[in-house]
Amino acid sequence: MTDWIETAGSPFVIMERDYAQRYDAEKSYNTICGVDEYAGTVEIDGHKIVVLGDEPMPVKVIRQGDETIIIRWRYAPGASEVESIVNNLDFEALTEISREVIDFDSRDLMLFDSAAYLKEDSNAVKLQTLHKTVNITTYEYNSESVALIIHKLKS
């Protein structure tokens, strides 16, 4: 499990690690920010990029077996409340918002701030999938005091 990471206000992106080294944040920023959904895809320079859109939210990455869970914190009184919910997640009880299948060129991926060049960004998280085809399911968790967006990546 990673610590909570944040951007400076731009969306997080997930892309192939090799392309992330060449990603031009300045050139791609308007395309990335055009994604309004909680999770959407764009293609830049022939590479598929997953954009965690809508509004900037702190993110935590959890690896569970062959799945990667990305928790996005919309609101909550504090980290302990969010982590208590995360530790007891029942995906059957969550509201599914969207489902997408992405065919990457590699199993080695990176999650990072779309406005930062990767070499400058200490908040980058390495992700590795079992296969190049990744199913991304997005869920919403809402209670009176906590709201989360949860992305499950499974290959």
Image (cartoon, rainbow, N blue to C red):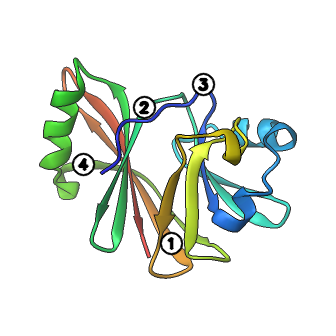
What whole-number distance in Å separates the C-alpha atoms at marks 4 and 1? 20 Å
| Circles 1 and 2 in contact, beta carbons < 8 Å | no
Please report whichever mark, 1 or 2, sits nearer to the chain's N-terminal start. Answer: 2
What whole-number distance in Å separates the C-alpha atoms at marks 3 and 4? 29 Å
Q: Which residue is mark 2?
A: 58
The local secondary structure at tag 4 comes to loop
Please report whichever mark, 3 or 4, sits nearer to the chain's N-terminal start. Answer: 3
14 vs 81: above or below: below
Is residue 155 found left or right of 141 in the rendered image?
Answer: right
| Circles 3 and 4 in contact, beta carbons < 8 Å | no
Three-letter residue code for mark 2: Pro
Residue under the image location 56 percent in, 30 percent down: 7
Q: Residues within 10 Å of mark 3 (few under 14, many from 20)?
A: few
Nearest-to-viewer mark from 3 and 1: 3
The extreme top residue here reads 77
What whole-number distance in Å separates the C-alpha atoms at marks 2 and 4? 20 Å
Q: Which mark is residue 94?
A: 4
Spot occupied by residue 18 in the image (x, y as percentages of width and height): 71, 67
